[in-house]
Image (spheres, helix red, strand yellow):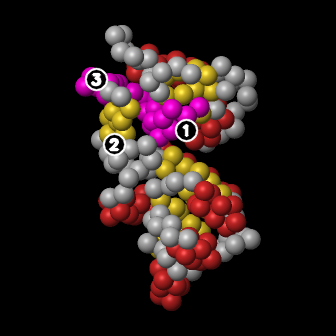
Amino acid sequence: MKILLVEDDAEQARFIRKGLQEAGHVVDHAADGRDGLFLATTANFDAIVLDRMLPRVDGLTVLRTLRASAIATPVVVLSALGEVDDRVAGLRAGGDDYLVKPFALAELLARLEVLQRRAGAPGTGSADSTRLQLADLEMDLLRRTASRGGQRLELKPKEFQLLEFLMRHPEQVVTRSMLLEAVWDYHFDPRTNVIDVHISNLRNRVDLPGHEPLIHTVRGAGYRLGRHAA
């Protein structure tokens, strides 16, 4: 899933983002309500994890604005306010679920899975949010498998996440910074070659002999997953 996390507590945001990414999700983060509302209304997400108490624009206002704009992206509200009236207010504002802090990451992941099944909506880059496909390259996100031309690809965890991110942005140029933030959740020294090494390994696994190359280097820009070189 491609998830928008709107959380102003930096430590909490790092914890949640890391856990979601380790579970194979792609995560964008906003640190306040205004930025969260901007991202939620200008990009496509499979789910939103929204803190209730936010600076600039509070979480309930974000929710009401989204629903008034006919944006139906499933939203899990996070809050330290756990009384019945608080939960009811969050749900009536447009939330699909309400999780009281502190919470176990496993519970958040389970609730997101439930929302995904309930929605049955298209995910980014695919007619089914649990399956991605480009040409004869396929990924099953539930089984955590990938194949090319029916032949299973043996991918390491980071390679799987890297390929998933590329497949969620087909025919688009993705920069090294985008990949570092989405897959590793770190700001590496720009001189690092970690991306180059992983792309090289991934290309060796995906672009099999006798198959059309799908992973392309865009000189000076980044990489692109597509059927033809730019």
Q: Is residue 58 placed above or below 19 in the rendered structure?
A: below
On the picture, is 57 further left or further right than 51? right
Give the mark nearest the N terminus, 2 or 3.
Answer: 2
Q: CA distance from mark 2 to mark 3?
A: 15 Å
Residue 167: name its quadrant: top left
Label 3 SS: loop
Question: Are the residues at dot 1 and dot 3 in contact (C-beta closer than 8 Å)?
Answer: no
Kindly identify the residue that appears in the image at 49 percent across and 76 percent down.
Answer: 94
- Residue bearing mark 2: 131
On the picture, is 84 further left or further right than 29? left
On the picture, is 214 further left or further right than 176? left
Q: Is residue 78 placed above or below 128 in the rendered structure?
A: below
The numbered disc on residue 183 is 1
Q: Amino acid at mark 1?
A: Val
On the picture, is 1 further left or further right than 187? left
Q: Amino acid at mark 3?
A: Gly
Kindly identify the residue that appears in the image at 65 percent across and 61 percent down.
Answer: 38
Question: Residue 195's spot in the image, x, y percent?
Answer: 60, 26
Q: Is residue 88 visible?
A: yes
Label 2 SS: strand
Q: CA distance from mark 1 to mark 3?
A: 25 Å
Question: Residue 143's spot in the image, x, y percent?
Answer: 30, 41
Give the mark nearest the N terminus, 1 or 3.
Answer: 3
